[in-house]
Image (cartoon, rainbow, N blue to C red):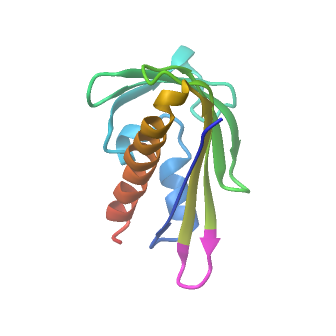
Amino acid sequence: MPRVYVSSVINSRSDRVWARVRDFNALPLWHPGIAESRIENGEPADKVGCVRDFRLRNGDRIRERLLGLSDFDLFCTYSILESPMGVENYVATLRLTPITDGDRTFVEWTAEFDCPPEREADLMSSIGGGVFQGGFDALKRQFGG
């Protein structure tokens, strides 16, 4: 089972960064690869079990279920329900940790999934570099760092 891990530091307090990323429906507001998103059945975007249906800028559609969300521990965990990526059993967690020296935020994004062995390297690269690091780079730009 491949495991992707990407981390970074954002030059802003963790409460400010968390306010931007905690909304499970807000990907288009901070991630450059996401064109639009909606929560199915009109459920709240912070309700564990809700499903977001979103489109990438290239037109691909992905559906994900929120598995966990903690305003205390600053993390959200989700699974992919449908995706053109060809992954199964995909579970990812986005976690923030306050850095008290300079009011910065340590961010981590991890994912584990199953895929055909010949696709593993490509998927790890596109998820880690394109999705996770792409999101962190956009957050750093938004928060001035």
Residue 110 belongs to magenta span: no
The quadrant of the image that shows the N terminus is top right
Res. 105 image quadrant: bottom right
Residue 3's x, y, as percent?
Answer: 61, 44
Tell me which residue sits at (55%, 61%) in the image: 107
Residue farthest front in this picture: 118
Residue that protrudes farthest toward the top in the picture: 41
Q: Position of residue 116 (x, y in %)?
A: 54, 24
- Residue 99, compared with residue 64, is above or below; it is below
Q: Is residue 137 above or below residue 101?
A: above
In this rendering, would 16 be left or right of 1?
A: left
Picture coordinates of residue 123 (x, y %)?
46, 35
At x 36%, y 44%, the residue is 29
Q: Quarter of the image for the C terminus: give it.
A: bottom left
Rendered view: 50 above or below 19? above
Which stretch is magenta? 98-104
Q: Residue furthest left?
A: 58
Q: Is residue 126 left or right of residue 74?
A: left
Image location of residue 98, percent across then percent down:
62, 70
Q: Residue at x 58, y 57 (%)?
A: 108
| Up/down of 71 relative to 56, above or below | below
Q: Residue at x 41, y 28 (%)?
A: 37
